[in-house]
Amino acid sequence: MASVLEQRIRAANEQDRKAVIPYLPCGWPDRERFWAEIEAMDAAGADVIEIGVPFSDPVADGPVIEEAVNVCLASGVTLAEIIEGLAARKGRLSAGLVLMGYVNPFMQYGWQRLARDAAKAGVNGLIVPDLPYEEADEVREILCAEGLDLIPLVGLNTSAERMALYAANASGFAYFVSVLGTTGARESLPGEVREGLALARRSFSVPVALGFGIRTPEQARAAGEADAVVVGSALVTHVGQGGGAAEFLRPFLK
């Protein structure tokens, strides 16, 4: 049976559109408004919501998200607080829920404890950019036992052979990184993205989401064979400037 995340993305595809996965770090632009924006994006129809777990060394994130994360850290946001916030809203959010964070905070919390508490809070999967494939089996087993997906990240420099390794254990969806670098809105996506996406689509049986660099609905619609698009830095900027996340998201959902 397909996981909740795969079901959410497939349901959007059946509506003849790419699923939309907005990203906000917890605590941005402040702790109270963050949760209001999450609820607003859910009400607007976000298919999956990616919640960033603030960490002081976000190696995959560009300057926009890094700056936002520093604000979240300065306000004292913790992983425990995120899980408590989601638990308080369990059953009220329709979107699939993913925690995006780094190994250090997750290890400090404890993988077993994290899997148990996150599942109870309604989380459906984790994205851990600095978790190497060679060290992922134990984590994947712990998460899988609680019904959580460990989302693989692949990209332009992932060989067909290595992509096949990721695909063999993939659940939920695969995250295709559109650039060789960190997150951040871009005017255009590299030309080789289309070819890389096509390879990913041939390799994975689960949906493939395109992320890093998406800033406009037009970019999202032109995202080749992607089943879903992740919108991060552009949304973080919009919310940071006082705009509502739901109003930003609605054009992507048409």
Image (tube, rainbow, N blue to C red):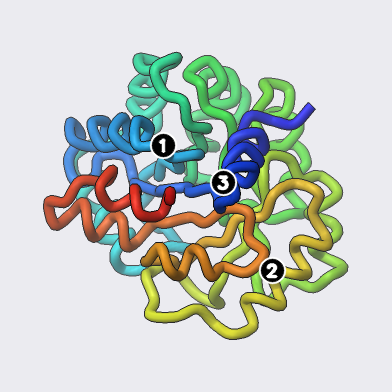
Tell me, yes or no, whether the two marked residues, 3 and 1, touch with CB atoms within 8 Å. Answer: no
- Residue 197 numbered mark, or none: 2
Placement of 166 over or under 95, stated as above or below = below
Residue 227: x and y in percent read: 63, 54
3 or 1: mark nearer the eye: 1
- Residue 45 numbered mark, or none: 1
Q: Earlier in the sequence, mark 2 or mark 1?
A: 1
Q: 147 and 40: which one is in front? A: 40
| Left or right of residue 62: residue 170 | right
Q: Earlier in the sequence, mark 3 or mark 1?
A: 1
2 or 1: mark nearer the eye: 1
Q: Residue at x 20, y 34 (%)?
A: 31
Q: Residue at x 20, y 46 (%)?
A: 244
Residue 21: x and y in percent read: 47, 47
**Mark-to-mark CA distance, 3 and 1:** 21 Å
Decide: few, some or many residues near mark 2? Use Cα within 10 Å; few <14, some 14-19, many ≥20.
Answer: many
- Residue 127 numbered mark, or none: 3
| Left or right of residue 198: residue 83 | left
2 or 3: mark nearer the eye: 2
Residue at disc 3, secondary structure:
strand
Q: 71 and 124: which one is in front? A: 124
Q: Amino acid at mark 3?
A: Ile
Quadrant holding the N terminus: top right
Residue 218: x and y in percent read: 43, 68
Q: Residue at x 52, y 56 (%)?
A: 229
Identify the residue at the far left of this view: 242
Placement of 214 over or under 117, stated as above or below = below
Decide: few, some or many residues near mark 3? Use Cα within 10 Å; few <14, some 14-19, many ≥20.
Answer: many
Q: Residue at x 66, y 41 (%)?
A: 10
Identify the residue at the far bottom of this view: 191
- Residue 253 numbered mark, or none: none
Q: Amino acid at mark 2?
A: Leu
